[in-house]
Amino acid sequence: MLNTSRSSLISTLQRLNARAVSTIVSDTHVTDFSVENEPILGYMPGSPERAELEAALRKHESQMADVPIMIGDKEYRTDEVRHQVMPHKHSHKLAQFYYATSELVQKAINTAMAEREKWERVPLNDKFEMWLKAADLMAGKYRQDLNATTMLGQSKTVIQAEIDSAAELIDFLRFNALYAKEGVKWQPRSPTPDVTVNKLRFRGLEGFIAAVSPFNFTAIGGNLAYTPAMMGNVVLWKPSDTAIISNYMVYKIMREVGVPGGVVSFIPADGPVFGDTITKAPQLAAINFTGSVPTFQRLWTQVGQNLSNYVNFPRLVGECGGKNYHLIHPSADATSVVNGTIRSAFEYCGQKCSACSRAYIPQSLWPQVKEGLIATQKELKVGDVKEFDSFTSAVIDEKAFKRITGYIDHAKSSPKLSIVAGGKYDMSVGYFIEPTIVETTDPHDCIMTEEIFGPVLTVYVYPDEKVDDMITVANTSTPYALTGAIFAQDEAWLAKATDALKDSAGNFYINDKSTGSVVAQQPFGGARMSGTNDKAGGLHYALKWTSPQTIKQTMVPLTQMSSIHI
């Protein structure tokens, strides 16, 4: 038994030390809140949102924005002037921006490191409040500016912009804050708290994070840069040249809600200049990337070559696209196959990482599916994004146009391939390519195995009895594993295929299209050459950007503990 004086001493030490531990890890005590997915607006004729969007489109199209390099609170401009054009009218310059030099990238690193300690000490509660406020601004005051700049700069139709630069971006901010709030609540067990208290402190990474974002989703840019920042990190954000104006809008909104300039620097730059500079910096803590496989491999290689120079082992997070499939069983509903495949393959010109670009269809269903695909393809309007009845618009730039049309030309010339629908293209005004459906007699032709990232769908028609062989083909014929979908009404086959294809896709769909993941509903990411599968939009994504510290605090003098075993 402890005597009275010793009990009193332990009680006093416990109270004092509990206060100390609480202060050390105070960010585990966060204000409770809840969120829901942002509703998608309809933009029907005469609706308030349509009128507001049309006004925003007129405003942003009538002026050429000047977008500076932002480091800290200072604007920088260089002699390397670039322009973002409208892909559907490439003679129209939408924004002027500037490439950062290696010296400016290094200045951004220095600025970030000077800001890091101060920003990390800002309580998570305060950060969550900023992120939720930014989401509210994006849902209201700035919604149509985000949509308009995305439509004009990235040639997204109204609905494709709404689900991206409004709904998904807002959802990323809200749900990442929610999941971080829930995640930091977990604390290790303290079985004898009168003797020992165990705590977990969620620190930011020791260094800076480089965020490299793509053109195809405004929301991805916001997520790559600002989710790490929310967890106490400092970030250098390199936006895509073809998404400058919408991404800069995100940056300005986050500054408006109180994110300091040194926390996220906005760094348009030539890819190799940016990559070479960040990978040489000893303070590199992580790269958060979405883009092509060759670029991610180059960055990974450079990190490997510089490992001995770093303060920490950098974390590499990447999403690199895919060669996504629809595998159709003879029992599938043909109408669902047609509608799901058309939408997956051709919404936003097939420029979604998850877009279907290969389909395996049984001979017994092919006549009905083919008829449906052709009929539906004829109804798809390819036009200016300001024409609200356009199903899709132009591909992003001339480089993409030439790459995609190269595959169409291959389909026209190869004896193994035939054009079923589409196949026309014209870049005289904008980078327009018809939604194109190709049939192949070779499931391993390059058009079935290489990522195209454009409005080209290739179909392999197989004998019904070979349906299980198609599981193997779908699983092994490409180096990617991002998304895939199977269609069938045969429940036993669905179960078998789902099991056999478990490594073929990070996002797997049953009787649904391979696109359309929603934050908090279908966390997104794939493996193999599709990326590191870190599941953006999921529960643990925000905590990925922390470096947890375990703290054990003893509550009694060590001289009194000789008989206590811990």
Image (cartoon, helix red, strand yellow):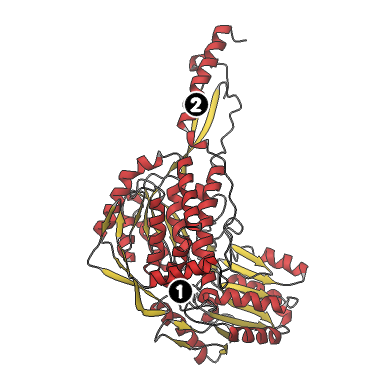
Residue located 32% across and 46% down the image: 113
Q: Which residue is nearer to you in this view: 8 or 413?
A: 8
Above/below status of 264 relative to 334: above
Q: Taking the image as drawn, is residue 353 in sight? A: no
Q: Which mark is residue 502?
A: none
As drawn, the residue found furthest toward the top would be 4
Q: Nearer the viewer, mark 1 or mark 2?
A: 1
Q: Name the residue that disc number 1 marks.
A: 155
- Direction from residue 98 to residue 1 in the image, left or right: right
Mark 1: which secondary structure? loop
Amino acid type of the residue that numbered disc 1 sits on in the rendered structure: Ser
The N terminus - image quarter:
top right
Q: Position of residue 400 (x, y in %)?
A: 42, 77
- Residue 232: name its quadrant: top left
Q: Which residue is nearer to you in this view: 472 or 355?
A: 355
Q: Taking the image as drawn, is residue 510 in sight? A: yes
Q: Name the residue that disc number 2 marks.
A: 553
Which numbered disc flags the more N-terminal residue, 1 or 2?
A: 1
Above/below status of 431 relative to 139: below
Residue located 38% across and 65% down the image: 245
Above/below status of 462 relative to 413: above
Above/below status of 166 relative to 402: above
- Residue 83: name its quadrant: bottom left
Amino acid type of the residue that numbered disc 2 sits on in the rendered structure: Gln
- Residue 470: name its quadrant: bottom right
Residue located 41% across and 82% down the image: 430
Q: Position of residue 49 (x, y in %)?
A: 53, 66
Residue located 73% across and 76% down the image: 333
Classify mark 2: residues with Cα within 10 Å, few (<14), some (14-19) or many (20+): some
